[in-house]
Amino acid sequence: MRRRFTHQNCSVARSLEVIGDWWTLLLVREAMLGTRRFADFAAELPISRNILARRLGHLVRRGVLARVDAGTHGRRYEYALTPMGKDLATVVTALRQWGDRWIFGAGREPLLVLDRRTGRPIPPVRILDEGGAPVSGRDLAVVPGPGASLRTAARHLRAAR
């Protein structure tokens, strides 16, 4: 039985409610590659039509995709990334780069992401400080934010001791 995270005071958990299964992220990837029609999603992914319909509906309800009238012969719709969906480009790129490094290995990347302006590969996604310098994982601190619940704040205070 799948557990729901809708009540957790955690951005990671709540984000997984929107994009947390493999079909959903693969649909987002396909949309980023220009796939827009139901039949084209079905042709690109080995997914059953009922699961595809459910996942696309979920992404529309959650605001990642918009269902737009294709304006051709009767009622046909396409799916387009919303600004929320387009913001997942960083997440998908980071995941792709992680897979290229740890699953496929250097020189065996299935796809390269290029900067259209220069034609050169984009650099690895990195965490940067406010001045633009890279920050390592050991230099990160996680502290309660303005939306932290009392439980979240107490948990992080205990961990900091």
Image (cartoon, helix red, strand yellow):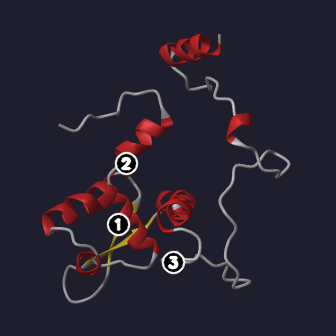
Sooner in the amino-acid sequence: mark 1 or mark 3: 1
Q: Where is residue 19 shown, x and y percent of the image?
A: 38, 51
Instruction: Determine contact: label 1, label 2, CB under 8 Å.
Output: no
* Residue labelled with disc 1: 27
**Label 1 SS:** helix
Q: Residue at x 78, y 50 (%)?
A: 134
| Nearer to us: label 2 or label 3 | 3
Q: Is residue 140 above or below residue 113?
A: above
| Image quadrant containing the N terminus | top left
In which quadrant of the rendered view does residue 36 lie?
Answer: bottom left
The amino acid at mark 2 is Val
Can you name the residue that lies furthest to the bottom here? 73
Q: Nearer the viewer, residue 37 or 29?
A: 29
* Residue labelled with disc 2: 18
Find residue 104 and name its label. Answer: none
**Label 3 SS:** loop
Q: Is residue 51 above or below residue 5?
A: below
Sooner in the amino-acid sequence: mark 1 or mark 2: 2
* Residue labelled with disc 3: 111
